[in-house]
Image (tube, rainbow, N blue to C red):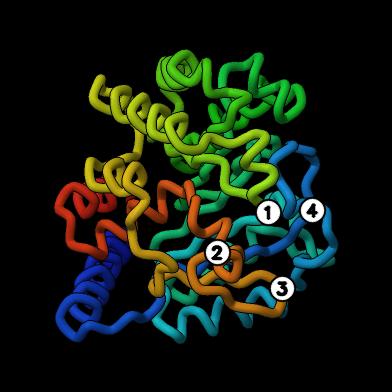
Amino acid sequence: MARRNSTLNRYLGYIAFAFATFVLRRKNPYLFILVINDKCNLDCFYCSSKNTGKYDLGYTSVRSALSAAYGRGCRALVITGGEPMMWRDRHRAIHDAVAYAKRLGFHDIALFTNGTHPLDIADITFIVTIDGTKEIHDAIRGRTYDAILANVEKSKSPVIASITLSKTNADTVEKAIREIDRLGEFAGITFNLLTHNPDVVARHGLLGKERHHMLDRMWALKRQGYPIILSRAAYRALKSNNWRRPIAQIALKAGNRIFTCCRDVDNPDICRNCGYSSCAEISQALACKPSAIYQLLKTI
């Protein structure tokens, strides 16, 4: 009965949000992204948000941020870092933060993790970074591939694989997707085109024709039946780069500030070349593109 009520509340929440957004034309936030810490046990070359000492929140601050977001109407939650599975505040762990979010009423909860810690939280979605084939992944993220897969296999919740696409893994992306799919452990595969400061993207990212070619390859893999989370509308929007951003329906808290969409919103050079496929997907669903709405409902 509790599970049935939870599902009912979830879909009632979708209906209420759709009515407010498309009928009343409100732009209230629905997805809340909480940067809970910046401590991380890995040292990936493309990450600038690890171990800066800026974003480690205490449990009281976490509760306050979640309560405020829920009060503003947010019902979907993504917790990220750093490495959120490492978050601690005295006797409190990430499990306590998730439990509090559930008690508040958040009904779609995802946790973005590097997968090197046990995925031992039930009834959420884990988004685990797998940056290519075992060889390429281990070159980027240390020798963690086998340990991650062991944790994924034992996970108490569904797991989505996430790939950050760069020059480093571009040549082997088809092989990586086939390997991930063959494992049979992942509920889907999502991806981002490396989104960073312009100098980092110039050295390591995919721009211009390279970006277009990569998107064509990802779409081809989707058409072949691989479980890539990418609608036709989002694929076209990412290629044309004309999707509307920042997205008012996404609120992100990092430190003492709440950003609209992401923490690079103030940097037009980064925003202009955004490669976050999930943001493109959300933008197209909000633009009432049927393929994006279908993909979003299928994923959540």
Front in this rendered view, residue 239 or 95? 239
Instruction: Determine whether 54 is above or below 85 in the image.
Output: below
Real-space CA distance between mark 2 and mark 4, rounded to the nearest whole angstrom: 27 Å
Q: Residues within 10 Å of mark 4 (few under 14, many from 20)?
A: many
SS state under label 1: helix
- Residue beneath the point at 56% across and 39% down: 128
In primary-sequence order, the first of circles 3 and 1 is: 1
- Residue beneath the point at 85% across and 62% down: 53
Q: Are marks 2 and 3 in contact (CB under 8 Å)?
A: no
Residue located beneath label 3 in the image: 255
Mark 2 is on which residue type?
A: Pro
Left or right: 89 as drawn, with respect to 67: right
Real-space CA distance between mark 2 and mark 3, rounded to the nearest whole angstrom: 21 Å
In primary-sequence order, the first of circles 2 and 3 is: 3
Q: Residues within 10 Å of mark 3 (few under 14, many from 20)?
A: some
In primary-sequence order, the first of circles 4 and 1 is: 4
User: Which mark is drawn over residue 84?
Assistant: 1
Q: Give the residue at the far front of this rendering.
A: 208
Residue located beneath label 4 in the image: 39
Q: Are marks 4 and 3 in contact (CB under 8 Å)?
A: no
Residue located beneath label 2 in the image: 268
Front in this rendered view, residue 290 or 157? 290
Instruction: Determine whether 255 is above or below 276 in the image.
Output: below
